Image: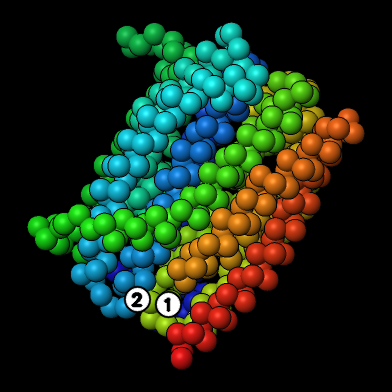
Amino acid sequence: MHIDLTQGELKVQIKKLAIPASIGFFFHTMYNVTDTYFAGLISTQALSALALSFSVFFMMIALAGGMSEAVTSLVGNALGKKDPKMAGHIALNSLVFALFLSFVLTVTGVLSTPYLMTLLGAKGAYLQESLDYINVILYGSVFFIFSFFINALLNAVGDTVSFRNILMFTSVLNIVLDYWFVYGGLGVEPLGLMGISLATVIAELITVVYLFYKLNKTSLLNSTKEFYFDRSVFKEFIKQGLPPSANMVLMAAGIFIITYFAAPFGQEVIAAFGIGMRIEQIILMPSIGLNVAVLAIVSQNNGAKQFERIAQTLKVSLYYGGVISLIGMLLLLVGAEQFMELFSDDSKVIEAGALYLRVEAFILFSFVVIFVHLAMLQGIEKPSFIFYISIFRQIIAPILLLSLVSYLALGMLWVWLSIALIVTFSALATWRYSYQKLEEVSKNKEE
C-alpha cells in the first residue's frame, strides 16, 4: 500500500510527510553533532581533521542523495500514473544501481582522498588523523548509499516515518559507540578519531537492515521474481539523478572551496566553519523535511497531471519555510556563542563560528526557497536547471568572490558575507526559473 498524494488536503499531507522526515534528518545530523562533540574532546586538531574530512565525506553522500532523489521522482510518477508494476520495476533496478554506485564511490574515494587532504594543507599527524577517519567511512559507503536509496523508495510511497524511527534509535546508539570507541574499554583499545567513524558505519548498517525490512512490507518488491536488468531505467536514473547529484557534489566542492580560502586564517577558523555548518544544518532541518514532502507530492501529482495542486504545494511549503526561517534566524542571532560553546571551549573557534552563524541567520529563507523549488523541478522531471545553478552557486561565484576577498586581504567576515550574497542571488534565480518551467510543463501536457 502507498499513500495517494494526488488527493486530500495539502496542508495535512505536507505536515504528515515533512515532520517525520525533519525529525529523521535531525537525528541523522546528530550523528555529525555527536562526532563533532567527541572530536572536540580529543583535541582542536581532531576537530579540524573532522572538518577537513567532511568535504570528502559529503561528496560521497551527495552522489547517493542526488541519485536517490531520482528514485523518488521516478517511482512517485509511476504511482501517480496508477502503474504499480512499473513502480516496482524501477524500485528493483534502483537497488542494483545502488550496489554499482557503492563500488565506484569506494574505489574513487580511497584513491583520491590523500591528494585532496594534502591540497587542503594537511600533513604529518594532521593528515594521518584525517585519513584514519575518512577511510573507514569510505569502506562502509555501501551502507550509507543503500540507506539513501531505500529511504527514497519509502518516501515515494509516502512513508517518512520509518526513517525517523530508526534514526532516533541509531543516533543514540552512535553516542554510546563514540564514547566506547574513542576511550576504549571492554576489550577495545582507544581508537581516537577512527573510532568515531567506525561507530557511524555500524549505526548505518543497522539503519539499512531496518529500512529494508520496512521496504519489504510495501508492494514495491512484489515482482522480485520478474526482475530483469533494464538499461533504460538506468539511463533514467542518470538523466534524472545527475543534476541533483551534481548539485550535492558541487555543494561538497563548494565546502572544499570555502575551506581552501578559510585555511589561511588558521585551524581554529576551519574548526569553527565545520561546527557552524552542523549547527546550521540543525536549524534548517525542518526545511529539509519540506524538501522531502515537496518531492514526493509533486512527483505523484505530476504523474497524475494535477499541476494546480503542484503550484499550491509550493505556496504552502514556502509559508511553512518562512516561519521556520524566522524562528531559526532569531535563535542564531541571540544564541550564536552559546551554540558554539557546546562544541568547543577555544575562544578563537567560538568567535569565528559565532560570526559565521550570525551572517547565515539572514539567508535561512533563501536556502528554503532553493530547497523547495529544486525539489519541485525534480518532481516534474525537469532537473537540468539544478546543475547550472549549482555550478554558479558552488563553483564560479565562490571562486570569483573569494579570490577577490583574498586579493584585497579582507577579513574573515567578508568570506561569510560573500557566501550570503551568492545564496541570496541564487534563490531569486531559482524561484523565477521554477515558476516559468512549471507553467511551461503544465501547458505542454494539457495540449
Whole-percent x, y for residue 161 in the image: 38, 56
Query: Who is closer to the viewer here, 159 or 224?
Result: 224
Give the SS element for disc 2.
helix
Query: Who is closer to the viewer here, 111 or 285?
Result: 111
Residue 325 versus residue 191 in the image, above or below? below
For residue 288, which quarter of the picture? bottom right
Whole-percent x, y for residue 24 in the image: 45, 49
Query: Who is closer to the viewer here, 352 or 49?
Result: 49
Decide if residue 419 is in sight here. yes
Whole-percent x, y for residue 272 in the image: 70, 30
Query: Who is closer to the viewer here, 296 or 135?
Result: 135
Q: Rounded to the nearest whole Å, what is the CA distance between mark 1 and mark 2?
A: 6 Å
Amino acid type at mark 1: Asn
Q: Residues within 10 Å of mark 2 (few under 14, many from 20)?
A: many
Q: Residue at x 41, y 52 (%)?
A: 67
Number of numbered discs on residues: 2
Q: Residue at x 88, y 30 (%)?
A: 409
For residue 301, which quarter of the picture? bottom left
The label number, if any, that marks residue 301 in the structure image: 1
